[in-house]
Amino acid sequence: MGTTRPIQVYQWCSAGHYVEKSQAIRQEADSKLCCPIHLRPLALKEQRFLVPSEAYDRPRQPKLLPSRPAAVAVGVASGLVLADNYERKGLVLVNTSANVISLSFVYPPAVLNSGITLNAAGGTFVMGEYTFTTGPVYAIAAGALSNLAVQEYT
């Protein structure tokens, strides 16, 4: 949980009703801030209500449910790594082999060293806001039986 910060400042009227400062009205006689309901002057006591800052500063993230981690053997011919998944909300692909692996997210399938290419021993692709797709994922490798670690989120 993040830090907290005040979002509104309230003052209390003498009848015990709290009033947001922006809603207070001015009495013509003495120009004091008054409660719009009771028409009584506001007390000097202020209270700040704190809420988590991320509740207002950041958009809410959808809950992600990870699938079981998987390993896919990618060969020297382009093949399907992941089928269409219309519930997909995230995807992480990691090349754990000693060979280069290239990816394609459209048909025709992947072409080696074209498009998104994952270097050997740790090359990673993380699906983000601008690379998001629910379509199929194809891959091709420079060597036979190259391992591609897959983590999908729904």
Image (cartoon, rainbow, N blue to C red):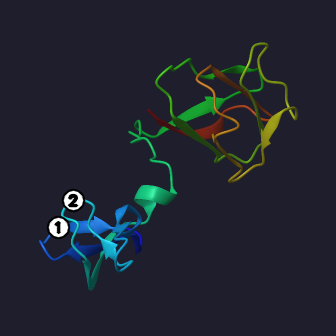
Task: Check residue 17 in the rendering and tell me which mark sits there, or answer none.
Answer: 1
State which quadrant residue 3 falls in.
bottom left
Tell me if 78 is positioned left or right of 111 in this view: left
Foreground tag (1 vs 2): 2
**Residue drawn at (39%, 42%), measured in percent from left and top?**
63
Mark 1: amino acid: His
Q: Nearer the viewer, residue 7 or 154?
A: 7
Reply above or below: 76 against 127. above
Q: Secondary structure at mark 2?
A: loop
Q: CA distance from mark 1 to mark 2?
A: 9 Å
State which quadrant residue 4 falls in.
bottom left
Tell me if 39 is positioned left or right of 86 in this view: left
Q: Which of the image's four quarters has the C terminus? A: top left
- Whether residue 100 is visible here, answered yes or no, is no
Circles 1, 2 touching at the beta carbon (< 8 Å):
yes
Reply above or below: 123 against 154. below
Task: Check residue 89 in the rendering and tell me which mark sits there, or answer none.
Answer: none
Question: x and y percent of residue 40 in the render?
Answer: 21, 72
Q: Secondary structure at mark 1?
A: loop
How crowded pointer 2 is (Cα within 10 Å; few <14, some 14-19, many 20+) is rated as few
Mark 2: amino acid: Ile
**Residue drawn at (46%, 24%), measured in percent from left and top?**
87
Tell me if 144 is positioned left or right of 19 in this view: right
**Residue drawn at (57%, 32%), measured in percent from left and top?**
72
Q: Residue furthest bottom?
A: 44
Q: Residue furthest top?
A: 108
State which quadrant residue 115 falls in.
top right
- Whether residue 97 is visible here, answered yes or no, is yes
Question: x and y percent of residue 38 in the render?
Answer: 18, 64
Residue marked by disc 2? 37
Q: Nearer the viewer, residue 144 or 38?
A: 38
